[in-house]
Amino acid sequence: AQKITQTQPGMFVQEKEAVTLDCTYDTSDPSYGLFWYKQPSSGEMIFLIYQGSYDQQNATEGRYSLNFQKARKSANLVISASQLGDSAMYFCAMRERGSGGSYIPTFGRGTSLIVHP
Amino acid sequence: NAGVTQTPKFRILKIGQSMTLQCTQDMNHNYMYWYRQDPGMGLKLIYYSVGAGITDKGEVPNGYNVSRSTTEDFPLRLELAAPSQTSVYFCASTTGNSQPQHFGDGTRLSIL
């Protein structure tokens, strides 16, 4: 089974509207962390937001928020007031403790977001 | 701050050749990672290190080797390059479990 599932290969949104990018995860580690990264067409990886498994509140960073539903193992990224510069690939990632005790990161396949003017 | 520096940025290899992708970070991070990203896909973990002298395999280690003799450097070695290793390679580092990874700009490698 995939540890990180992003079911939306591509998403389109109108400028200034909100968009939700889906991410579900699978882990037996009670102390895990979830990250979202943005990868523009230029190729660099940009950190957006982090949610720890024990965090009581949903994480927010400016126009980014994370809709964390622990029981459903869901960590959707919400981008409010979309901008043309938000067009990029978005990756959900999870950090969990591996069998050797070290923290192992796993990435989803990504969602391509295109913002229309 | 330089952050994570990868060299080279681009490289073309012939089948069977070997090369080393360099990665260095100046943030004193213990954790370092090597990923490959195939077209339209996410990042797959090749090898990782939790500190100098300690390395371990990730999801796709075959055909690669790493070493970590210092905190700063984490080179990735390709032996006997194959076309299936054509990819973009990213190096990343972090201080710990709740902190995001800092990525290098990537190395685009083609094997012909």
Image (spheres, helix red, strand yellow):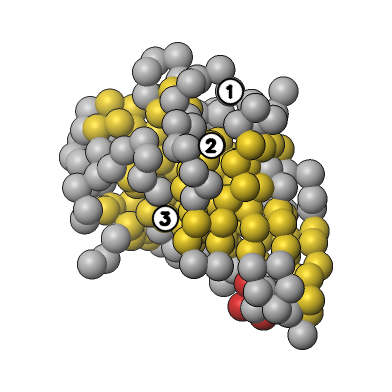
Q: Chain of mark 2?
A: A
Q: In the image, B69: left or right of A109?
A: left
- Amino acid carrying mark 3 in the image: Phe
**Mark 2–mark 1 distance (CA, rounded to whole Å):** 9 Å
| Residue B6 in the image, given as x and y percentages of width and height | 37, 58
Q: Position of residue B45 (x, y in %)?
A: 52, 36
> Residue lying farthest front?
A56
For the point 29% across and 60% down, the residue is B3
Quadrant of res A5: top right
Q: Are marks 1 and 3 in contact (CB under 8 Å)?
A: no
Give the image location of residue A93, x and y in percent: 56, 42
Residue type, mark 1 in image = Thr
Check the image and name the residue furthest to the bottom.
A117
* Residues under numbered marks 2 and 1 in contact, where contact means CB atoms less than 8 Å apart: yes
Residue type of the residue flagged with mark 2? Met
Decide if residue B1 is on the left or right side of residue B75.
Answer: left
Q: Is residue B80 above or below residue B40?
A: above
Residue at figure coordinates x 65%, y 78% from the top left:
A83
Quickly name the residue at label 2. A94
Label 2: how many Cα within 10 Å (few below 14, some 14–19, many 20+): many
Q: Is residue B31 or residue B65 the one in the foreground? A: B31
Q: Whole-Å distance between the Cαs marked 1 and 3?
A: 24 Å
* Rendered residue at 37%/24% (across/down): A102
Q: Position of residue A117 (x, y in %)?
A: 77, 85
In this orientation, which residue lies closer to the viewer: B78 or B24? B24
Of residues A70 and B58, the one drawn nearer to the viewer in this rendering: A70
Q: Earlier in the sequence, mark 2 or mark 1?
A: 1
Give the chain of mark 3.
B
Check disc 3 and report the residue beneath it. B103
The quarter holding residue A15 reads bottom right
